[in-house]
Image (tube, rainbow, N blue to C red):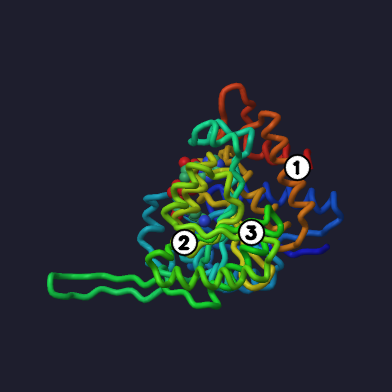
C-alpha cells in the first residue's frame, strides 16, 4: 500500500513528537511492505511567522490532496505578546478550527485507555482501575449548541442570553454510523449519551440512533443519560466500549475520560468526515515549557499514527503492532519524565521513540 501523509508539525514540541510518529510509520512500512511518504506543511505560529496567517491556503490544498493528515500541536507560550495581540482569526488556534472544517471532519474520536503498566497514575480506586479502562468517545464535532443560534437581548428584569442545541436527522445519522462501524472493530457495544428525559433534541437523537442500530444487529446499544454517564465513568468505566455523544456532551465527557487514565502525554485522537481522510493528533497542546528539551512524551502522537493506520488505511494488524510495541516498552519499565515513577527507567523523548521502533 502507498499513502501520502500531510504533516502539520506545528509549534513547540510539535516537530519532536511528529518525528516520533514518522519514525514509527516508516518502520511499519518497512516491516509490512507499505510505502508512506510525508509532506511537511505550515500551520500555527510557524505559519504566522513565515506567511502572516495561521493556515495558508497552500496547506489546506495539500491536505485535501493527501490520504491523511498528522498534526502535532499549535500555539505559542501562554502570555506571548506577539501572538496574543493578533485578532482572533489570525491566532494559531484559528488554523486548527479552519483545517477541521476545510476537511469536513464531523466526528472526533478520543480513545481513553488505561495502560496496565501505568495503573498507578489512575486517580480511581484500585479495585475499579483493575477492571481496566478501554473506551472511545465518538463526539459529533461540527453541530449542536456550539454552532446553533445564539444571542443576547433585554427583557423585563434585565439582560438575557441564549444558545441553541439543534440537530437534524442527517447529522445524528452520520455520527451514529461512525460509532457503530467503530464498535464492529472493537467489542461490539455502543452507549449513546443523551438527556432525553428533558431535551427534545435528545429525544430526536435517541430515535435516530435506534434507527441506525437496526443496520447493526451485531452491535449492542445502550442509552444512557449524560448525568448518569458522568457518574458511571468514575464508578464503573470498564462497562464502556464506544461512547456516542453530541458535541457539548462529548466535550465534557471526553475530558473526564482522559483524566481517569493518567497522563496527557499518552492520549491520541482522530477526526474524520465522510471520506477515509482523517486528521490525527495527540490531545495535548504544544507544551512550550518543555519544547526543544527532548523530554516530551511522543506516545500520544505515535498512538494517533496507529489510529491513522486502523481508521484511514484499514490496516488493523499494523495498528496493533504499534500499540503492542508501546505496551511492551511500558511493561519493560521505560518512562518519559511525565509518567516517571519510582523504580522505572527514565528516557528522553527520542529514546522512547527508538525503543518503540525497535519493538515493532
Ligand atoms: P499543553 O497541553 O501544551 O501543556 C499542558 C502541560 O502538559 C504542560 O506542563 C506540558 O509540559 C505538559 N505536556 C503536554 N504534552 C506533553 C507531552 N507530550 N509530554 C510531556 N508533557 C506534556 O497545554 P497548555 O500549556 O495549556 O497550552 C500550550 C499551548 O498549546 C497554547 O498555545 C495552547 O493554545 C495550545 N494548545 C494546542 C492544542 C492543539 O494544537 N490541538 C491543544 C491544546 C492547547
Q: Is residue 119 above or below residue 322?
A: above
Q: Closer to the camera, 98 or 207?
A: 207
Quarter of the image where one finds residue 188: bottom right
What residue would you read off at disc 1? 357
Q: Is mark 2 within 8 Å of ligand 1?
A: yes
Q: Nearer the viewer, mark 1 or mark 3?
A: 3
What residue would you read off at disc 2? 93
Few, some or many C-alpha atoms within 10 Å of disc 2 (few <14, some 14-19, many ≥20)?
Answer: some
Tell me the CA gap for discs 1 and 3: 37 Å
As drawn, the label of residue 220 is 3
Tell me the CA gap for discs 2 and 3: 38 Å
Query: Where is residue 319 shown, x and y percent of the image?
Result: 74, 51
Tell me the CA gap for discs 1 and 2: 31 Å
Q: Are marks 2 and 3 in contact (CB under 8 Å)?
A: no
Which residue is at 49% across, 57% downward? 224
Q: Is mark 1 within 8 Å of ligand 1?
A: no
Amino acid at each position: 500500500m502507498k499513502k501520502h501523509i500531510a504533516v502539520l508539525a506545528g509549534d513547540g514540541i510539535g516537530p519532536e513528537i511528529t518525528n516520533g510518529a514518522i519514525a514509527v510509520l516508516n518502520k511499519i512500512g518497512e516491516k509490512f511492505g507499505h510505502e508512506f511518504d510525508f509532506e511537511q506543511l505550515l500551520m500555527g505560529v510557524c505559519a504566522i511567522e513565515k506567511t502572516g496567517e495561521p493556515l495558508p491556503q497552500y496547506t489546506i490544498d495539500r491536505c485535501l490532496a493527501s490520504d491523511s493528515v498528522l498534526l502535532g500541536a499549535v500555539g505559542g507560550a501562554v502570555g506571548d505578546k506577539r501572538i496574543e495581540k493578533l485578532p482572533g482569526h489570525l491566532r494559531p488556534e484559528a488554523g486548527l478550527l479552519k483545517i477541521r472544517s476545510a476537511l469536513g471532519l464531523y466526528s472526533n474520536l478520543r480513545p481513553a485507555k488505561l495502560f496496565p503498566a501505568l495503573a498507578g497514575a489512575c486517580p480511581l480506586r484500585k479495585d475499579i482501575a483493575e477492571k481496566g479502562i478501554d473506551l472511545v468517545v465518538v463526539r459529533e464535532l461540527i453541530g449542536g449548541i456550539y454552532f446553533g443560534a445564539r444571542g443576547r437581548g433585554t427583557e423585563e428584569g434585565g439582560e438575557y442570553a441564549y444558545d441553541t442545541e439543534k440537530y437534524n436527522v442527517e447529522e445524528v445519522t452520520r455520527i451514529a454510523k461512525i460509532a457503530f462501524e467503530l464498535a464492529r472493530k472493537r467489542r461490539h457495544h455502543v452507549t449513546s449519551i443523551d438527556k432525553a428525559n428533558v431535551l427534545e433534541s435528545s429525544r430526536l437523537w435517541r430515535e435516530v440512533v435506534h434507527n441506525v442500530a437496526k443496520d447493526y444487529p451485531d452491535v449492542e446499544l445502550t442509552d444512557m443519560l449524560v448525568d448518569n454517564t458522568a457518574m458511571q465513568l468514575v464508578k464503573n468505566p470498564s462497562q464502556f466500549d464506544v461512547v456516542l455523544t453530541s458535541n457539548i456532551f462529548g466535550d465534557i465527557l471526553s475530558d473526564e475520560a482522559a483524566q481517569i487514565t493518567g497522563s496527557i502525554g499518552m492520549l491520541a485522537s482522530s477526526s474524520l468526515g465522510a471520506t477515509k481522510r482523517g486528521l490525527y493528533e495527540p490531545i495535548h497542546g504544544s507544551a512550550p515549557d518543555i519544547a526543544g528539551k527532548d523530554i516530551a512524551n511522543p506516545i500520544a502522537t505515535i498512538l494517533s499514527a496507529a489510529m491513522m493506520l486502523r481508521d484511514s488505511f484499514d490496516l488493523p494488524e499494523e495498528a496493533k503492532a504499534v500499540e503492542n510495541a508501546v505496551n511492551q516498552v511500558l511493561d519493560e519499565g521505560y518512562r518519559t519524565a511525565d509518567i516517571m515513577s519510582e523504580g522505572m527507567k527514565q528516557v528522553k523523548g527520542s529514546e522512547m521513540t527508538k525503543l518503540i521502533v525497535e519493538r515493532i
